[in-house]
Image (tube, rainbow, N blue to C red):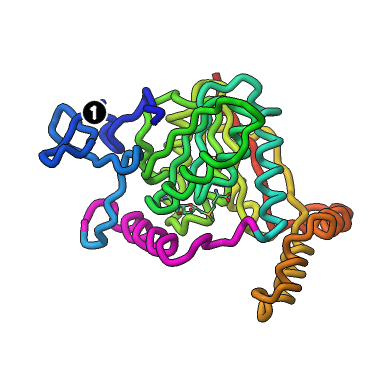
Amino acid sequence: MTTLPFLVEPGTLASLHSATDTSGAPVLRTAGGASYSVVRDVPIFVNFDTESDAEPDVQHRAAEFEQMYRSLKEPWKYSGRMAEVLRHEFVATLAPEICPEPSWVLDLGCSVGQLSALLGKHFPRIASLDVSATAVWKAQEYCKTVANDGKATEFAFVVGSATELPFAAESFSLVVASDGLFGWELSESAQQQVVSEIVRVLKPGGAAIFTDYLGHKKFDRLLRLIDESPLRRERVEYLHDRLWYQMESWFHLVQESAVAKAILRNRPLALGLRRVAELWGAGASKHICVVARKQV
Ligand SMILES: C[S@@+](CC[C@H](N)C(=O)[O-])C[C@H]1O[C@@H](n2cnc3c(N)ncnc32)[C@H](O)[C@@H]1O
Protein backbone atom coordinates (compact mmCIF):
# COMPACT_ATOMS: atom_id res chain seq x y z
CA MET A 1 0.00 0.00 0.00
CA THR A 2 1.17 3.50 -0.77
CA THR A 3 0.64 5.59 2.35
CA LEU A 4 -0.13 9.18 1.58
CA PRO A 5 2.19 11.35 3.65
CA PHE A 6 -0.34 14.17 3.84
CA LEU A 7 -3.55 12.45 5.03
CA VAL A 8 -5.42 14.40 7.71
CA GLU A 9 -8.82 14.17 9.36
CA PRO A 10 -11.43 15.79 7.08
CA GLY A 11 -12.81 19.02 8.51
CA THR A 12 -10.48 19.44 11.51
CA LEU A 13 -7.30 18.71 9.47
CA ALA A 14 -5.91 16.97 12.58
CA SER A 15 -2.96 14.68 11.89
CA LEU A 16 -3.50 10.92 11.81
CA HIS A 17 -1.40 8.00 12.93
CA SER A 18 -1.68 4.29 12.08
CA ALA A 19 -2.99 2.01 14.83
CA THR A 20 -5.13 -1.11 15.23
CA ASP A 21 -8.56 -1.47 16.79
CA THR A 22 -9.51 -4.00 19.46
CA SER A 23 -9.95 -6.74 16.82
CA GLY A 24 -6.50 -6.02 15.37
CA ALA A 25 -7.85 -4.32 12.22
CA PRO A 26 -5.90 -1.31 10.90
CA VAL A 27 -7.25 2.14 11.66
CA LEU A 28 -6.11 5.75 11.42
CA ARG A 29 -6.42 7.75 14.66
CA THR A 30 -6.24 11.36 15.67
CA ALA A 31 -4.57 12.37 18.93
CA GLY A 32 -8.10 13.27 20.12
CA GLY A 33 -9.20 9.61 19.74
CA ALA A 34 -11.26 9.77 16.50
CA SER A 35 -10.76 6.57 14.53
CA TYR A 36 -11.16 5.77 10.81
CA SER A 37 -11.13 2.27 9.41
CA VAL A 38 -8.71 1.16 6.71
CA VAL A 39 -10.23 -1.58 4.57
CA ARG A 40 -8.22 -3.35 1.83
CA ASP A 41 -5.53 -0.68 2.34
CA VAL A 42 -8.03 2.12 1.72
CA PRO A 43 -8.72 4.71 4.46
CA ILE A 44 -12.47 5.34 4.80
CA PHE A 45 -13.54 8.86 5.74
CA VAL A 46 -17.22 8.53 4.77
CA ASN A 47 -19.92 7.19 7.01
CA PHE A 48 -22.50 5.35 4.87
CA ASP A 49 -25.01 5.37 7.69
CA THR A 50 -27.84 7.58 6.34
CA GLU A 51 -29.10 8.11 9.91
CA SER A 52 -25.87 9.88 10.82
CA ASP A 53 -26.33 13.65 11.14
CA ALA A 54 -22.87 14.58 9.87
CA GLU A 55 -23.18 16.64 6.65
CA PRO A 56 -26.68 15.24 5.96
CA ASP A 57 -26.78 16.30 2.30
CA VAL A 58 -23.45 14.76 1.33
CA GLN A 59 -24.04 11.79 3.65
CA HIS A 60 -27.26 10.94 1.88
CA ARG A 61 -25.70 11.23 -1.60
CA ALA A 62 -22.74 9.09 -0.48
CA ALA A 63 -25.11 6.29 0.50
CA GLU A 64 -26.86 6.59 -2.88
CA PHE A 65 -23.61 6.48 -4.88
CA GLU A 66 -22.41 3.55 -2.77
CA GLN A 67 -25.64 1.67 -3.42
CA MET A 68 -25.29 2.34 -7.17
CA TYR A 69 -21.80 0.81 -7.24
CA ARG A 70 -22.92 -2.19 -5.17
CA SER A 71 -25.77 -2.99 -7.54
CA LEU A 72 -24.20 -2.15 -10.91
CA LYS A 73 -20.85 -3.29 -12.29
CA GLU A 74 -20.16 0.07 -13.93
CA PRO A 75 -22.94 2.62 -13.28
CA TRP A 76 -22.23 4.94 -16.22
CA LYS A 77 -20.92 2.20 -18.52
CA TYR A 78 -18.06 4.49 -19.50
CA SER A 79 -15.86 1.79 -20.97
CA GLY A 80 -18.53 0.89 -23.56
CA ARG A 81 -19.31 4.51 -24.54
CA MET A 82 -16.71 5.99 -26.87
CA ALA A 83 -17.53 9.65 -26.06
CA GLU A 84 -16.58 8.92 -22.43
CA VAL A 85 -13.41 7.06 -23.41
CA LEU A 86 -12.43 10.06 -25.57
CA ARG A 87 -13.21 12.41 -22.66
CA HIS A 88 -10.89 10.44 -20.37
CA GLU A 89 -8.18 10.49 -23.04
CA PHE A 90 -8.69 14.22 -23.58
CA VAL A 91 -8.16 14.98 -19.88
CA ALA A 92 -5.19 12.62 -19.55
CA THR A 93 -3.50 14.25 -22.58
CA LEU A 94 -4.24 17.79 -21.42
CA ALA A 95 -3.01 17.14 -17.85
CA PRO A 96 0.77 16.88 -18.54
CA GLU A 97 0.57 19.95 -20.81
CA ILE A 98 -0.69 22.15 -17.99
CA CYS A 99 1.26 20.46 -15.21
CA PRO A 100 4.65 19.33 -16.53
CA GLU A 101 6.36 18.55 -13.19
CA PRO A 102 3.83 17.17 -10.77
CA SER A 103 4.36 15.75 -7.32
CA TRP A 104 1.06 14.07 -6.45
CA VAL A 105 -1.96 14.30 -8.75
CA LEU A 106 -5.46 13.99 -7.28
CA ASP A 107 -8.30 12.34 -9.24
CA LEU A 108 -11.50 13.46 -7.51
CA GLY A 109 -14.56 11.23 -7.91
CA CYS A 110 -12.40 8.50 -9.43
CA SER A 111 -15.25 6.03 -10.02
CA VAL A 112 -13.88 2.65 -11.16
CA GLY A 113 -10.49 4.11 -12.05
CA GLN A 114 -10.33 4.52 -15.84
CA LEU A 115 -9.12 8.13 -15.68
CA SER A 116 -6.76 7.43 -12.75
CA ALA A 117 -5.13 4.64 -14.78
CA LEU A 118 -4.69 6.92 -17.80
CA LEU A 119 -3.24 9.70 -15.62
CA GLY A 120 -0.83 7.09 -14.26
CA LYS A 121 0.67 6.78 -17.74
CA HIS A 122 1.78 10.43 -17.54
CA PHE A 123 2.39 11.04 -13.83
CA PRO A 124 4.38 9.09 -11.22
CA ARG A 125 1.99 9.43 -8.26
CA ILE A 126 -1.81 9.39 -8.37
CA ALA A 127 -4.17 9.74 -5.39
CA SER A 128 -7.74 8.69 -6.26
CA LEU A 129 -10.71 9.58 -4.08
CA ASP A 130 -14.38 8.73 -4.37
CA VAL A 131 -17.32 8.96 -2.00
CA SER A 132 -18.20 5.30 -2.73
CA ALA A 133 -16.03 2.63 -1.08
CA THR A 134 -17.10 0.03 -3.65
CA ALA A 135 -16.05 2.34 -6.50
CA VAL A 136 -12.66 2.90 -4.88
CA TRP A 137 -12.00 -0.82 -4.39
CA LYS A 138 -12.93 -1.41 -8.03
CA ALA A 139 -10.57 1.42 -9.07
CA GLN A 140 -7.82 -0.11 -6.95
CA GLU A 141 -8.20 -3.46 -8.73
CA TYR A 142 -8.42 -1.83 -12.16
CA CYS A 143 -5.29 0.29 -11.68
CA LYS A 144 -3.39 -2.84 -10.54
CA THR A 145 -4.29 -4.68 -13.73
CA VAL A 146 -3.71 -2.06 -16.44
CA ALA A 147 -0.34 -2.16 -18.14
CA ASN A 148 1.51 1.07 -17.55
CA ASP A 149 4.22 0.93 -20.20
CA GLY A 150 6.70 -0.32 -17.60
CA LYS A 151 6.30 2.82 -15.46
CA ALA A 152 6.23 2.28 -11.70
CA THR A 153 3.29 4.57 -10.95
CA GLU A 154 2.33 4.84 -7.29
CA PHE A 155 -1.44 4.73 -6.80
CA ALA A 156 -3.11 5.56 -3.49
CA PHE A 157 -6.85 5.28 -2.87
CA VAL A 158 -9.09 7.04 -0.36
CA VAL A 159 -12.82 7.00 0.37
CA GLY A 160 -13.88 10.56 1.15
CA SER A 161 -15.94 13.50 0.02
CA ALA A 162 -14.72 16.30 -2.21
CA THR A 163 -16.55 18.69 0.14
CA GLU A 164 -14.11 17.88 3.00
CA LEU A 165 -10.87 16.55 1.61
CA PRO A 166 -8.72 14.45 3.94
CA PHE A 167 -5.51 16.05 2.70
CA ALA A 168 -3.20 18.68 4.16
CA ALA A 169 -2.96 22.09 2.47
CA GLU A 170 -0.78 22.39 -0.62
CA SER A 171 -0.40 18.64 -1.18
CA PHE A 172 -1.08 18.45 -4.95
CA SER A 173 0.26 20.07 -8.08
CA LEU A 174 -2.78 18.96 -10.10
CA VAL A 175 -6.36 18.20 -9.11
CA VAL A 176 -8.76 16.67 -11.65
CA ALA A 177 -12.51 16.93 -11.04
CA SER A 178 -13.90 15.22 -14.10
CA ASP A 179 -17.74 14.96 -14.17
CA GLY A 180 -17.37 16.48 -11.47
CA LEU A 181 -18.90 19.38 -9.68
CA PHE A 182 -22.26 19.09 -11.43
CA GLY A 183 -22.34 15.27 -11.50
CA TRP A 184 -22.13 15.00 -7.70
CA GLU A 185 -25.62 16.40 -7.15
CA LEU A 186 -24.47 18.95 -4.60
CA SER A 187 -26.10 22.20 -3.52
CA GLU A 188 -24.50 25.39 -4.82
CA SER A 189 -22.91 26.06 -1.42
CA ALA A 190 -21.48 22.52 -1.35
CA GLN A 191 -20.08 23.07 -4.87
CA GLN A 192 -18.41 26.27 -3.62
CA GLN A 193 -17.04 24.29 -0.68
CA VAL A 194 -15.52 21.75 -3.12
CA VAL A 195 -13.81 24.53 -5.08
CA SER A 196 -12.43 25.98 -1.79
CA GLU A 197 -11.15 22.53 -0.84
CA ILE A 198 -9.46 22.17 -4.24
CA VAL A 199 -7.80 25.57 -3.75
CA ARG A 200 -6.66 24.54 -0.24
CA VAL A 201 -5.02 21.27 -1.32
CA LEU A 202 -3.35 22.72 -4.44
CA LYS A 203 0.23 23.91 -4.23
CA PRO A 204 0.73 27.56 -5.23
CA GLY A 205 0.96 27.55 -9.02
CA GLY A 206 -0.84 24.20 -9.16
CA ALA A 207 -3.67 23.60 -11.62
CA ALA A 208 -7.15 22.11 -11.58
CA ILE A 209 -9.01 20.52 -14.49
CA PHE A 210 -12.79 20.48 -14.36
CA THR A 211 -15.06 18.74 -16.84
CA ASP A 212 -18.84 18.63 -16.69
CA TYR A 213 -21.73 17.43 -18.82
CA LEU A 214 -23.88 20.56 -18.94
CA GLY A 215 -24.77 21.58 -22.50
CA HIS A 216 -23.82 25.00 -23.86
CA LYS A 217 -26.72 26.86 -22.24
CA LYS A 218 -25.42 25.91 -18.79
CA PHE A 219 -21.66 26.18 -19.34
CA ASP A 220 -21.66 29.57 -17.57
CA ARG A 221 -22.61 27.84 -14.28
CA LEU A 222 -19.23 26.11 -14.08
CA LEU A 223 -17.38 29.20 -15.33
CA ARG A 224 -19.08 31.34 -12.66
CA LEU A 225 -18.18 28.92 -9.85
CA ILE A 226 -14.53 29.06 -10.89
CA ASP A 227 -14.45 32.81 -11.52
CA GLU A 228 -15.89 33.46 -8.04
CA SER A 229 -13.04 31.44 -6.47
CA PRO A 230 -9.38 32.39 -5.99
CA LEU A 231 -8.52 30.19 -9.01
CA ARG A 232 -7.57 31.96 -12.22
CA ARG A 233 -9.22 30.54 -15.30
CA GLU A 234 -6.57 29.67 -17.88
CA ARG A 235 -8.22 27.68 -20.62
CA VAL A 236 -11.70 26.59 -21.72
CA GLU A 237 -12.18 23.64 -24.07
CA TYR A 238 -15.29 22.09 -25.59
CA LEU A 239 -15.44 18.37 -26.21
CA HIS A 240 -17.68 18.53 -29.30
CA ASP A 241 -19.60 15.45 -28.25
CA ARG A 242 -23.20 16.56 -28.76
CA LEU A 243 -23.72 14.60 -31.99
CA TRP A 244 -22.42 11.46 -30.29
CA TYR A 245 -24.91 11.82 -27.39
CA GLN A 246 -27.65 12.56 -29.92
CA MET A 247 -26.78 9.31 -31.69
CA GLU A 248 -26.71 7.46 -28.36
CA SER A 249 -30.24 8.65 -27.59
CA TRP A 250 -31.49 6.95 -30.79
CA PHE A 251 -30.28 3.62 -29.40
CA HIS A 252 -31.79 4.16 -25.98
CA LEU A 253 -34.39 1.40 -26.24
CA VAL A 254 -32.03 -1.15 -27.78
CA GLN A 255 -28.82 -0.21 -25.96
CA GLU A 256 -28.18 -3.79 -24.85
CA SER A 257 -28.28 -5.16 -28.41
CA ALA A 258 -24.98 -6.24 -29.98
CA VAL A 259 -25.38 -3.74 -32.84
CA ALA A 260 -25.98 -0.79 -30.49
CA LYS A 261 -23.04 -1.80 -28.30
CA ALA A 262 -20.75 -2.04 -31.35
CA ILE A 263 -21.85 1.39 -32.61
CA LEU A 264 -21.48 3.08 -29.22
CA ARG A 265 -17.94 1.81 -28.76
CA ASN A 266 -16.88 2.55 -32.35
CA ARG A 267 -13.89 4.92 -32.21
CA PRO A 268 -13.71 6.06 -35.88
CA LEU A 269 -17.43 6.88 -35.76
CA ALA A 270 -17.06 8.90 -32.53
CA LEU A 271 -14.03 10.74 -33.94
CA GLY A 272 -15.93 11.46 -37.17
CA LEU A 273 -18.91 12.88 -35.25
CA ARG A 274 -16.51 15.00 -33.20
CA ARG A 275 -14.90 16.41 -36.36
CA VAL A 276 -18.29 17.41 -37.74
CA ALA A 277 -19.33 18.93 -34.38
CA GLU A 278 -16.12 20.99 -34.25
CA LEU A 279 -17.50 23.03 -37.16
CA TRP A 280 -20.29 24.32 -34.85
CA GLY A 281 -18.13 25.26 -31.84
CA ALA A 282 -19.38 25.30 -28.24
CA GLY A 283 -23.01 24.73 -29.21
CA ALA A 284 -22.12 21.24 -30.42
CA SER A 285 -20.66 20.26 -27.05
CA LYS A 286 -22.31 18.65 -24.07
CA HIS A 287 -19.05 18.72 -22.12
CA ILE A 288 -17.02 21.72 -21.15
CA CYS A 289 -13.48 21.45 -19.78
CA VAL A 290 -11.95 24.27 -17.75
CA VAL A 291 -8.34 24.61 -16.62
CA ALA A 292 -7.77 26.98 -13.70
CA ARG A 293 -4.69 27.78 -11.65
CA LYS A 294 -3.95 28.74 -8.07
CA GLN A 295 -1.85 31.88 -7.98
CA VAL A 296 1.69 31.75 -6.58
C1 LIG B 1 -20.20 10.80 -13.02
S1 LIG B 1 -18.98 9.87 -12.15
C2 LIG B 1 -17.48 10.49 -12.88
C3 LIG B 1 -16.34 9.56 -12.72
C4 LIG B 1 -14.98 9.99 -13.27
N1 LIG B 1 -14.45 11.14 -12.60
C5 LIG B 1 -14.98 10.22 -14.75
O1 LIG B 1 -14.66 11.30 -15.20
O2 LIG B 1 -15.30 9.28 -15.48
C6 LIG B 1 -19.02 10.73 -10.60
C7 LIG B 1 -18.24 10.04 -9.49
O3 LIG B 1 -18.11 10.94 -8.39
C8 LIG B 1 -18.39 10.26 -7.19
N2 LIG B 1 -18.87 11.25 -6.19
C9 LIG B 1 -20.14 11.68 -5.99
N3 LIG B 1 -20.17 12.59 -5.02
C10 LIG B 1 -18.90 12.77 -4.60
C11 LIG B 1 -18.29 13.56 -3.59
N4 LIG B 1 -19.01 14.40 -2.81
N5 LIG B 1 -16.96 13.46 -3.42
C12 LIG B 1 -16.21 12.62 -4.17
N6 LIG B 1 -16.73 11.83 -5.14
C13 LIG B 1 -18.06 11.90 -5.36
C14 LIG B 1 -19.42 9.20 -7.55
O4 LIG B 1 -19.40 8.13 -6.63
C15 LIG B 1 -18.93 8.80 -8.95
O5 LIG B 1 -18.01 7.75 -8.87
Q: Quadrant of residue 20?
A: top left
Q: Residue at x 83, y 60 (%)?
A: 269
Q: State which quarter of the image contains the C terminus.
A: top right
Q: State which quarter of the image contains the N terminus.
A: top left
Q: Is residue 30 magenta?
A: no
24 vs 16, left or right, is left
48 vs 289, left or right, is left
- Can residue 227 be seen from the camera position used here? no
48 vs 292, left or right, is left
Q: Is residue 54 magenta?
A: yes
Q: Residue at x 63, y 27 (%)?
A: 150
Predominant secondary structure, magenta span: helix
Query: Three-letter amino acid code at disc 1?
Result: Ser
Judging depth in this view, the residue of 248 and 212 nearest the camera is 248
Q: Quadrant of residue 115?
A: top right
Q: Residue at x 43, y 47 (%)?
A: 136
Relative image position of residue 223 (x, y in whole percent): 61, 46
- Find the magenta span and give its range: 52-79
Count of labels in the image? 1
Relative image position of residue 224 (x, y in whole percent): 58, 46
Mark 1 close to ligand 1, CB under 8 Å: no
193 vs 218, left or right, is left
Q: Is residue 14 above or below residue 73?
A: above
Q: Is residue 200 above or below residue 259?
A: above
- Can residue 201 be seen from the camera position used here? yes
Judging depth in this view, the residue of 143 and 157 nearest the camera is 143
Relative image position of residue 220 (x, y in whole percent): 64, 52
